[in-house]
Image: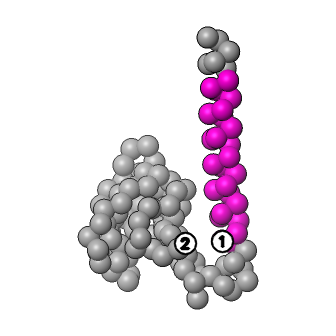
Amino acid sequence: MVNVIFISAIVILCIIMAVAVNKKRVLNNLDSDILSGKLKRIEIVLNMAVPIDEFETIKLVSINSANSATIKVLKSGIILTAKSNSFFKGSDFGNYGLLLFSVSKEKSEIVLRQTFST
């Protein structure tokens, strides 16, 4: 029984490490494409006082516990939630997505990074 638990723990640890390495690889590839001019990245800062971005596409709905945030995509009406340093899942942001770069509960503010092809 102890061996089964030990092997299960090792498998779970390996999966977590593989996901982290793959995420880092994806982000590094995006960074090199941005530097080469194939992609463009914009940074969007939203807070509860100014919850809608300048392009009127995203609205900050809430800053949640566990370092996550909820947004509403104004064109589609879809509501999405992501944790800090994770992508919002959805088809509204193309192939490269919208990254919740940081969350500050103290400032009631989030920083998003949107990457798209030029």
When the figure is inspected, residue 22 is found, relative to residue 45, above or below; the finding is: above
- Who's the residue at 67% across and 24% down the image? 7
Residue 14 shown in magenta: yes
**Mark 2 neighbour class, 10 Å CA radius: few under 14, some 14 to 19, many 20 or more:** some
Q: Horizontally, is 70 left or right of 8 in the view?
A: left
Q: Main secondary structure of the magenta part?
A: helix
Neighbor class of circle 1 (other Cα within 10 Å; few <14, some 14-19, many 20+) is some
| Residue at x-position 70% and y-position 65% | 28
Figure quadrant of the C terminus:
bottom right
User: For this view, does 35 lie left or right of residue 57?
Assistant: right
Please give the range of residues in magenta.
7-31
Q: Position of residue 27 (x, y in %)?
A: 65, 64
For badge 2, the amino acid type reads: Tyr
Earlier-in-chain disc, 1 versus 2: 1
The vertical placement of 46 against 75, above or below, is: above
Which of 5 and 112 lies nearest the eye of the viewer? 5
Q: Nearer the viewer, residue 21 or 103?
A: 21
Q: Are marks 1 and 2 in contact (CB under 8 Å)?
A: yes
| Residue 96 pos. (x, y %) | 55, 72
Label 1: state its secondary structure. helix
Toward the left, the furthest residue is 77
Tell me which amino acid carries mark 1: Leu
Q: Residue at x 48, y 76 (%)?
A: 94
Q: Which residue is mark 2?
A: 96
Q: CA distance from mark 1 to mark 2?
A: 8 Å
Look at the numbered disc 2 and give the secondary structure of its residue.
loop
Q: Which residue is mark 1?
A: 30
